[in-house]
Image (cartoon, rainbow, N blue to C red):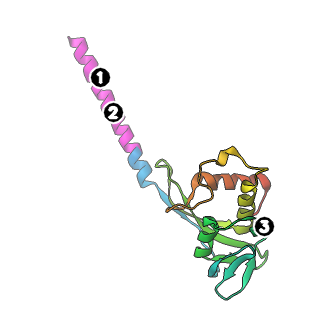
């Protein structure tokens, strides 16, 4: 009988200790979540985009090489246009902002807005959509859409890996 009580008490003590550790880790991960918000230095308001490039509210068209490979509608380019674009004065490369949705509760990022090189992103999206280079890894992920909270973090990570592999500008 004494052995059974000792086993029961040891089990309860272990379960209580384990629950406390789990609670501490959950609380720690919740409180350490942070925002990762990138910005544009000199944003310009875009009215939208076409197969030629981004249309600025001033009437000017900012050409984006390869954008004609993206067939409208593109929620990703719509989102970038909605947030404005920036033209680098030296390289003339166009940058935009894209929200990224970190949907996993274990992720330490709460809110993420990434500054992206639009030409590289367009090349990546066109490459992914090319049947010759199509990968089953993108099936069913929704990488061509921007959800309520942003672009799927798995898709964004794929884009980041592609940038590293190809040496494309950020």
Q: Is residue 62 above or below residue 25?
A: below
**Label 2 Cα crowd, 10 Å radius (few <14 / some 14-19 / many 20+):** few
Residue 89 falls inside the magenta stretch: no
Indicate the position of residue 10 as horizontal and vertical percent values: 29, 22
Q: Position of residue 62 (x, y in %)?
A: 74, 79
For residue 36, which quarter of the picture? bottom right
> In the orientation shown, which residue stands out farthest toward the bottom?
58
Marks 3 and 2, how far apart at CA: 58 Å
Q: Earlier in the sequence, mark 3 or mark 2?
A: 2
3D distance between C-alphas at marks 3 and 1: 66 Å
Coordinates of residue 37 in the picture (x, y in percent)? 55, 66
Looking at the rendered image, the quarter that the C terminus falls into is bottom right
Determine whether the residue tagged by mark 2 lies in a helix, strand or loop: helix
Q: Say which residue label 3 marks.
A: 66
Q: Looking at the picture, does residue 105 appear above or below residue 124?
A: above
Q: Residue at x 79, y 74 (%)?
A: 91
Which circle marks residue 17 in the picture? 2
Please tell me whether residue 4 belongs to the stretch shown in magenta: yes
> Between tags 3 and 2, which lies in front?
3
Residue at 38% from the left image edge and 48% from the top image edge: 27
**Dot 1: within a 10 Å radius of its alpha carbon, few (fewer than 14), some, or many (20 or more) residues?**
few
Can see residue 170? no
Circles 3 and 1: CB atoms closer than 8 Å: no
State the SS at label 1: helix
Residue 51 % position (x, y)? 74, 73
**Range of residues picked out in magenta:** 1-25
Q: Quadrant of the N terminus?
A: top left
């Amino acid at each position: 009988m004494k052995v059974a009580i000792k086993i029961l008490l040891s089990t309860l003590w272990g379960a209580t200790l384990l629950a406390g550790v789990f609670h501490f880790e959950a609380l720690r991960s919740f409180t350490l979540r942070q925002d990762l918000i990138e910005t544009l230095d000199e944003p310009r308001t875009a009215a939208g985009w076409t197969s030629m490039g981004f249309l600025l509210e001033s009437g000017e068209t900012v050409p984006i090489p390869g954008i004609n490979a993206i067939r409208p509608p593109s929620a990703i380019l719509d989102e970038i246009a909605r947030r404005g674009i920036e033209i680098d004065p030296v390289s003339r490369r166009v940058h935009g902002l894209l929200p990224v949705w970190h949907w996993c509760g274990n992720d330490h990022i709460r809110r993420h807005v990434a500054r992206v090189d639009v030409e590289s992103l367009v090349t990546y999206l066109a490459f992914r959509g090319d049947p010759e280079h199509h990968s089953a890894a993108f099936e069913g992920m929704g990488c061509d859409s921007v959800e309520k909270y942003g672009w799927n973090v798995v898709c964004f990570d794929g884009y980041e890996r592609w940038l590293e592999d190809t040496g494309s500008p950020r």
